[in-house]
Image (cartoon, grey):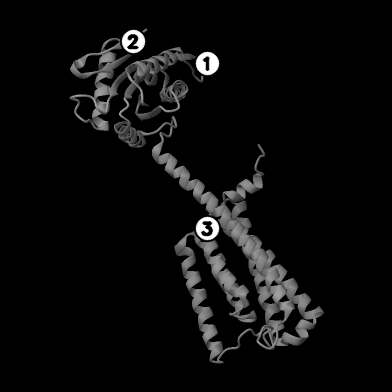
Amino acid sequence: MKKTPARLLTLYRLLDWSDRDKCLLLSVLLWGYMGLVYLWHLFTVHFTDFARQFVSAEGAEVMNQVMILNQVGWLGLIAWGSLLRRRERHSRYYPVAFMSFFSIGFLLLAWTVGFYSPMTGMVLMGSPLVGFILFGFPQVAWNFAFSVLVVLLLAWLSVLEYSAHAIYFITYPITREVVSYYWVASTVAFMVPFIATVITLISLLLRRWIYREAQIRDQAVHDPLTGLANRRELFRLLAHELARGRRSGLPMAICIMDLDHFKRINDQYGHGAGDRVLVKMAETLNACLRESDLVGRIGGEEFVLVMPETDADGAANVLERCRDAIASTKVILDDGGILHVTASFGAIIWLADAAGQTPRSEAQLLSLADQALYQAKEQGRNRVLFWQDAYQTTSSAV
């Protein structure tokens, strides 16, 4: 399988970066992007007929000042962020400065080239979307609201002729009378990389977001040590299997397994050794059970096994196989020592249409299985014992 490059994997985890590193990356990208805009401006002013026809001398000078301000500002933010990163420090003012300068730079550029240009609208809508995902709503909302209000105010003032609109131009290059294809092509040329960058970042961020949500859901339903279903998930799965069993009328086996003398292991070898035993037992159970069977850890050294569509004989075979595999498993400790562990099993066979049987909930079935487990412990451990009405039992042991 092809490995993901380390840099791409790091970028894929952008959502997990600190605000400092996010701002540093975006500062580098924006410095490069504004540098390209500046180069375009210099080329346009000095080498094209478009400038002689549409660009004003005052507007060209203002664009020079806006571009120099952008270059100096982004370089300053890059230097600040790099210094913080080198010293492994963070500053709550750095993200604030980044977002504020972005708003100022955007507003100056929009005022220069026009508030109604496609590029202005694209930046106004695309940038907050990335910002909301990267930094959360509160930090971005104020700058976004401020930028929108200023754009609307200046646009309104320009309509009332209190303020110049698109001072870069003598005549705006796209009107009913004239269309400059140079300006159209330039606008598209700058929109494409911006849109591509925004889409790429959003794609990476959403994929990471989905992955993190899946992790959270997985952690909510699985035991963190063994990876088995936890108590909550096990009860949900058991309720589902009971409902399915009522429709099909097929039996189901429910079992509680408890490791024998587990407290002694923790006391004698430490909880680290106990955790290793639990992980090994989970692996052993998964290897012994069938694909249709369920297994979960409900606390301490107790495990629950659910075997749908299984009668007493089938359950006895499966549980005996598990018991024998556990007794034969070697758990190797950090010091090279070897532990042998045994387990006791208490099981009950559930029949949806059993004559005279009172409908039982998941908790009641587990309680009856726990009673059988208690009897298995009383009879010497390392055995499988079934609970039945009138306390009739069948058992197997070494």
Q: Which amino acid does label 1 sit on?
A: Gly
Residue 362: horizontal and vertical position, in percent? 27, 32
Picture residue at 76% right of the left edge, 87% below the top: 53
Q: At numbered mark 3, what does the secondary structure look like: helix, strand or loop? A: helix
Q: In which quarter of the image is residue 35?
A: bottom right
Residue at image location 47% in from the left, 44% down from the top: 214
Crowding at mark 2 (Cα within 10 Å: few <14, some 14-19, many 20+)? some
Quadrant where the N terminus is found in the figure: top right
User: Which label lies toward us, 1 or 3?
Assistant: 3
Give how far apart the Cα atoms at labels 2 and 1 are.
Answer: 32 Å
Residue 183 can be seen, yes or no: yes
Hey, what amino acid is under mark 2?
Answer: Ser
Is the C terminus in the top left, top right, bottom left or bottom right quadrant? Answer: top left
Q: Which residue lies furthest to the bottom in this view?
A: 161
> What secondary structure is marked by label 2?
strand
Indicate the position of residue 283 as horizontal and vertical percent values.
47, 24
Regarding residue 80, the answer to whether it shows in the image is: no
Tag shown at residue 396: 2
Instruction: Kindly indicate the quadrant of the structure image that contains residue 197.
Output: bottom right
Report the front residue among 158 and 357: 357
Q: Specify the quadrant of the image occupied by residue 56.
A: bottom right
Q: Look at mark 1 in the image and give the residue it sits on.
A: 336
**Which residue ends up furthest to the right in the rendered image?**
47
Viewer-side residue, 182 vs 69: 182
Residue at 72% in and 85% down: 54
